[in-house]
Image (cartoon, rainbow, N blue to C red):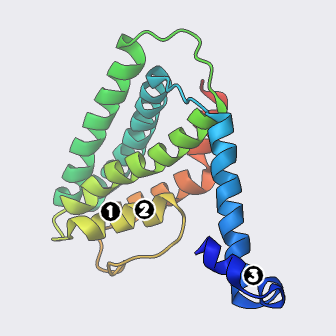
Amino acid sequence: FFFFFLLLPYDRRQTGTFHRVYTVFTALLEFKSCLERLKLKMHINYKVYIKILGFLTAIVGLGMLMCSAVGMFFGEWTASGALLITSLVCIAIGFVILTQLRFRKINLRFHEGWLIACMSWVYCSLLGAVPFYFGGMNYTIIGSFFEAVAGFTTTGCSVFDISLMPKCLALWKAVASWFGGMGILVFVVSIFP
């Protein structure tokens, strides 16, 4: 294609579609050569990920525990049971990671911060989808994951009818939105390590 471009008359090279394609092509070649010159090697420090995800697991579990208590108060036993079991598992996993695994002072690098932020949103959304799926309302896995993602990303979207949702699950969606709006992930990444 590049040689075909050179065969065109000079006035057609400077304007029109061919000039735009040539500009994009040369920009891509320049970007590729820049990456080859930099040759960045990213060393991943797994201890950072384990520590922060353990802390997030405990925080999400505590939020679910509060919602479970509200569900028990209103007599929504199936939904509050799903919240309670999930919260106890999350709290136990977070407690084990934070107390039994020894971590020294961990330095967080720039690329690790970006990866932790991305992983944390996906991880918290997976944890947050479990009570929706097992809450007794016959929600699908995709719908439950969508509800959790909508909560943690504070979009406010919903695929389920909120008026038919048990109060404890609606509260869990609100708590997840509060966690996401508060920027708990940014908070953990910036202060905890």
**Amino acid found under the numbered disc labelled 3:** His
Read off the residue under disc 2.
Answer: 149
Residue in view at x 21 percent, y 61 percent = 133
Q: Are marks 2 and 1 in contact (CB under 8 Å)?
A: yes
Residue in view at x 48 percent, y 57 percent = 152
The N terminus lies in quadrant: bottom right
Residue 168 is labelled as: none
Mark 3 closeness class: few <14, some 14–19, many ≥20 residues within 10 Å: some
Label 2 element class: helix
Q: Quadrant of residue 167?
A: bottom left
Residue 19 is labelled as: 3
The answer for how far apart the CA atoms under marks 2 and 1 are is 6 Å
- In percent of width and height, residue 119 lies at 45, 44
Is residue 54 depicted above or below 30 in this figure?
above
Q: Quadrant of residue 80?
A: bottom left
The C terminus lies in quadrant: top right
The answer for how far apart the CA atoms under marks 3 and 2 are is 43 Å
**Amino acid found under the numbered disc labelled 1:** Phe
Residue in view at x 64 percent, y 28 percent = 109
Is 98 situated left or right of 27 in this image? Answer: left
Q: Are marks 3 and 1 in contact (CB under 8 Å)?
A: no
Residue 145 is labelled as: 1
